[in-house]
Image (spheres, grey):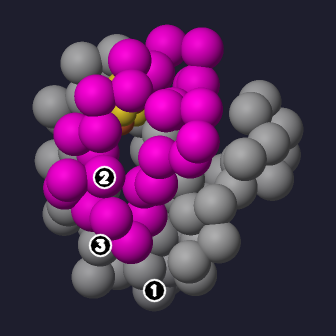
C-alpha cells in the first residue's frame, strides 16, 4: 500500500495524525504530509510524495482516509504479493 495527500485540499485539522502518527505528520505550515520511515515527504504533487505504508498501519491509514474532512488522502494498492 502507498499513500499520498493532496495538500491543496488539506484543512490542517490533524485527524490523520491522530489516527496514524507514524504515517502522517503536520509540518510548520499546518498542513499534513505523509512520512516514510519517519521522514516527511514534503514534495507536494511530486513523485516523492508517495509513501510506502507498512502492513501494520494499513487499517489506520484506511480509517484516516475515511474520516479526512478534505477527502485528500489517496491510497494506492500495490499489486505485488506481500506489499
Ligand atoms: S485528515 Fe485530511 S484534511 Fe485533515 S490534516 Fe489530515 S490530510 Fe489534512
Q: Earlier in the sequence, mark 3 or mark 2?
A: 2
Residue 1: x and y in percent read 47, 63
Q: What secondary structure is marked by label 3? A: helix
> Does the magenta run of residues contain 8?
yes
Q: Is residue 79 visible?
A: no
Q: Residue at x 79, y 42 (%)?
A: 43
| Disc 1 residue crowd, few under 14, some 14–19, many 20+, Cα 10 Å | few
Vertical placement of 81 versus 68: above or below?
below
Q: What secondary structure is marked by label 1? A: loop
Q: Residue at x 43, y 79 (%)?
A: 54
Quickly name the residue at label 3: 57
Q: Is residue 71 left or right of residue 48?
A: left
Quickly name the residue at label 1: 82
Residue 24: x and y in percent read 42, 55
Q: Which mark is residue 17?
A: 2
Q: Is residue 19 left or right of residue 34?
A: left
Residue 9: x and y in percent read 49, 13
Kindly report the distance in space between the C-alpha atoms of the residues bearing marks 1 and 2: 25 Å
Residue 17: x and y in percent read 30, 52
Amino acid at each position: 500500500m502507498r499513500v499520498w495527500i493532496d495538500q491543496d485540499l488539506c484543512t490542517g485539522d490533524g485527524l490523520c495524525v491522530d489516527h496514524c502518527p507514524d504515517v502522517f505528520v503536520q509540518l510548520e505550515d499546518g498542513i499534513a504530509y505523509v512520512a516514510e520511515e519517519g521522514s516527511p515527504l514534503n514534495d507536494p504533487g511530486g513523485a516523492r510524495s508517495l509513501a510506502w505504508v507498512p502492513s501494520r498501519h494499513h487499517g489506520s491509514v484506511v480509517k484516516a482516509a475515511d474520516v479526512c474532512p478534505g477527502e485528500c488522502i489517496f491510497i494506492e494498492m500495490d499489486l505485488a504479493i506481500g506489499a
